[in-house]
Image (spheres, rainbow, N blue to C red):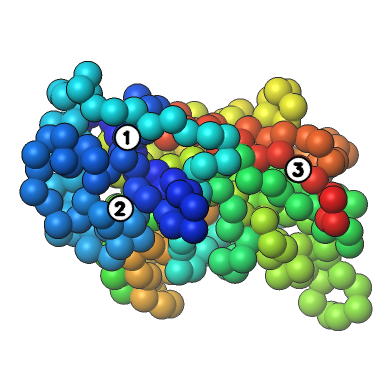
Amino acid sequence: MTWYALASLKTGDAVRTALVLDEKLFDLERTAESLSASIDWARSSVDELLARWTDVSPQIDRFAEDAVNAVARLEELTVGPNDVAPPLRPGRFFCAAANYIEHANEMGTVLAAKSDSNPYMFIKPDTALIGHNDTVIMPAASAQVDWEIELAAVIGREARHVPVAEALDYVAGYSVVNDVSARDLNVRDDFPFKMDWFQGKCFDTFAPLGPWFVPSSCIEDPHDLRMELAVNGEVMQDSSTGAMIFDIPEQIAYLSSILTLKPGDVLATGTPTGVGMARGVYLKPGDVMTASIESIGTLRNPVAAEGR
């Protein structure tokens, strides 16, 4: 399968879907017109496509192949630095904590044996979502804002009580997510519950996602992708998705044993070693994070202080 992706572009108050070929963007509707393709989903948003992914994904795969073969006569879009919106608007944002052993070690987290455990999941709100080149706002309440590159798996159909062996069939595709975290707000001493994932993880802008959505048909093995995060060009995290403790099927099986996963839900599948807290280094205004995952793309986000 030829690699392609789907992007969401800001056009005034509206968002249009673009086809991404070799990191060049083409308006989906205009591309369909250029190829004389009569398709009822050409004007659809990525969210609308995900809502009917089982039916339309084979058509989109074939359409992308045709577009690659005709790329010389397609009109490439001129895209400004702030034109790329989040590729989708997740209904829910599930996140896996301490899912790489070296990251758990650097954080001083003592894990039970995998055979005696389940994935540890938490949820981020939709207000945390931002896209490529959007600014992460550091809250005034925190002095320890940190980065976490993660592979985002996007659900493509309803999933309930899904066996591990079948779970990847429910994944529509992938993106890059940065689980921004306020480390000093992840703990508290005014309650007997010492960890507070809500106030440490859920600030506005704390879930950059993008730059686009890559269908699962374009990813041969989601557990064999290099991932790298740099701050101001200095590499902080450099690992592989193959180092997950609980892989994507195991996470889907666990979540779907509790609730019904729906199209458009996103699973942030955990971060590897190299976060700032382990180094005693945190984000500051003016920093720029770039989070890259092989076969998907690079998500860039500058950082600013609250109120600036």
Disc 3 packing (10 Å; few <14; some 14–19; many ≥20): many
Q: Nearer the viewer, residue 172 or 8?
A: 8
On-image quarter of the N terminus: top left
Q: Nearer the viewer, residue 76 or 152?
A: 76
- The reply to whether discs 3 and 2 touch (Cβ–Cβ < 8 Å) is no
> Does 50 sit left or right of 115 as displayed?
left
Residue where numbered disc 1 is placed: 26
- Look at discs 2 and 1 and give the one toward the viewer: 1
Give amino acid for label 1.
Phe
Give amino acid for label 2.
Ala
> Does 77 sit left or right of 274 as displayed?
left
Single out the residue that lies furthest toward the front. 12
Q: Secondary structure at mark 1?
A: strand
Residue where numbered disc 3 is placed: 303
Q: Quadrant of residue 154?
A: bottom left
> Does 251 sit left or right of 171 as displayed?
right
Q: Secondary structure at mark 2?
A: strand
Q: Quadrant of residue 300?
A: top right
Check the image and report above or below for 296 versus 46.
above
Where residue 299 appears, x then y in whole percent?
A: 56, 37
Which residue does the image show at 69% across and 46% down from the upper left? Answer: 135
Can residue 167 be seen in the rendering of this structure? no
Which residue does the image show at 45% across and 69% down from the upper left? Answer: 91
- Look at discs 3 and 2 and give the one toward the viewer: 3
Q: Quadrant of residue 4?
A: top left
**Any mark on residue 251, and which?**
none
Residue where numbered disc 2 is placed: 172
Which residue does the image show at 37% across and 70% down from the upper left? Answer: 261
Q: Mark 3 and mark 2: span between their CA atoms?
A: 30 Å
Disc 1 packing (10 Å; few <14; some 14–19; many ≥20): many
Give amino acid for label 3.
Val
Disc 2 packing (10 Å; few <14; some 14–19; many ≥20): many
